[in-house]
Amino acid sequence: TDMDEQDDTSYRRECDTYKIVTNRSEREFFAALSKELSKVEIRFNELWDRAVKAAKNWEDTPEESVSDNAERLSVLLHRCTNDHMFVLLVENYAVLNYCGFTKILKKHDKLRFTATRDKYMARMVNEKSFAKFDRMHEILLQIEGRFNHLAELVKRSQQHVSSHDTNGATPVANGAAF
């Protein structure tokens, strides 16, 4: 019955907790896992701070200084592309490590006949900043929006230049007509 299954599940959880507390190798395993979790969190926060700074730098770019300068637009598009790739790499770092902790705990539970994965993921891993993907998605959308805006400015700039070039004049390079 459902009640028997619930009793069995809660009993198994109590036994798992008892095993972790009383078994030295279990305590060492979870201590080592927590240490690795802390390392991932520290590194992620360093990378995340760089990504946030890059996004904030976009807010400080005045519109007027960009729109008439094709070379500046090109540089900003390149920078935007680099920032987007960097944030994607940070996101990949977070996802890869999240999946890694899940797999490690799944293997641990399989080998030790325990059910610690869900509880550890909920209490420890999911509370870490690298497990919160919505913030990364917001920054990616912000950078993509800025890229689209810059691409539109480049397009307008090129249309403006090409309309001035087609006034019936012969193109000249180094003083000689083609």
Image (cartoon, rainbow, N blue to C red):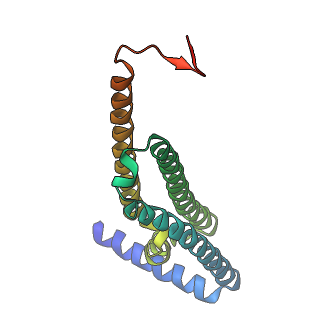
Camera-nearest residue between 1 and 108: 108
72 lies above or below 154: below
Residue depicted at x 62% and y 89%? 22
Farthest residue, direction left: 2
Residue 85 spot, x, y in % from top left: 53, 49
> Is residue 153 rendered to the left or right of residue 171?
left
Farthest residue, direction top: 178
Residue 83 spot, x, y in % from top left: 51, 54
Residue 165 spot, x, y in % from top left: 39, 22
> Is residue 157 rendered to the left or right of residue 46?
left
Quadrant occupied by the N terminus: bottom left
State which quadrant residue 101 falls in.
bottom right
Farthest residue, direction bottom: 22
Residue depicted at x 63% and y 75%? 39
105 lies above or below 17: above
114 lies above or below 71: below
Residue 3 spot, x, y in % from top left: 29, 72
Quadrant occupied by the C terminus: top right
46 lies above or below 165: below
Residue depicted at x 64% and y 82%? 31
Camera-nearest residue between 163 and 145: 163
Farthest residue, direction front: 175
Residue depicted at x 70% and y 80%? 25
Camera-nearest residue between 123 and 149: 149
Number of numbered discs present? Answer: 0
Camera-nearest residue between 50 and 166: 166
